[in-house]
Image (tube, rainbow, N blue to C red):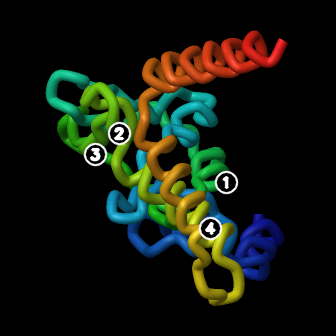
Amino acid sequence: MFKLLKEVFRTGEATVKYPFAPLEISKDFRGKPEHNAEQCIACAACTVACPANALTMETDLVAGTRTWSISYGRCVFCGRCEEVCPTQAIKLTPDFELAVANKADLTVKAVFKLANCVCCGEPFAPAKEIAYVTALIEAATVKDGAEVTATASAEIERRRRMLATCPSCKRVNDLVQIARITDQQEKRR
């Protein structure tokens, strides 16, 4: 028995004092996902990638809003949301202690305004998403700080208008253009 006690004292403590002392975590630890609504464009890429369906988006066309929400009770801390977010609006934190007294406290929401279609006026996509894509197109069109030519400016405006048009109106516009092309081809024959 003394040999056993001697061995126990020699090896020291094998357990940590958590929760009475802070737990040391590694730098690649995947904890609670934090959402930055300022950076988010409400594109729903994270909701599609979430295997646990902890992330959801609900669109209210009457109010013209899209609500993003995360339920930490469903989250498995896999990190897919952080990987697919184009604006890095979701970051995994080292925080893992999520105990709450009320289940509703495990849900976080953010509301985004929808942009209206330039043709029909109906809300169809998040305004921040349209602004983000428009900025990407402008940056791709105008490279290395070059001056914007009249042609490039017209192309940017055409693309901006196309982005601000809902899918239904795009289909109608496409059908009108197809009819015009068909009429022109008929006249040439």
Report the disc number at residue 83: 1
Report the disc number at residue 131: none
Residue at the image position 60 percent from the left and 61 percent from the top: 137
Is the Cβ of the residue at disc 3 closer than 8 Å to that at disc 4?
Answer: no
Please name the amino acid that badge 4 sits on.
Ala
* Of the image marks 3 and 4, the number of the one nearer the N terminus: 3
Residue 171, visible in the rendered structure: yes
Please name the amino acid that badge 2 sits on.
Trp
Residue 6 x, y percent position in the rendering: 77, 77
Report the disc number at residue 152: 4
Q: Is residue 67 left or right of residue 167?
A: left
Tell me the CA gap for discs 3 and 1: 22 Å
Image quadrant of residue 88?
A: bottom right
Please name the amino acid that badge 1 sits on.
Glu
Q: Is residue 150 left or right of residue 127?
A: right
Residue 91, visible in the rendered structure: no
Is the Cβ of the residue at disc 3 closer than 8 Å to that at disc 2?
Answer: yes
* Of the image marks 3 and 1, the number of the one nearer the N terminus: 1
Tell me the CA gap for discs 1 and 4: 33 Å
Tell me the CA gap for discs 2 and 1: 17 Å
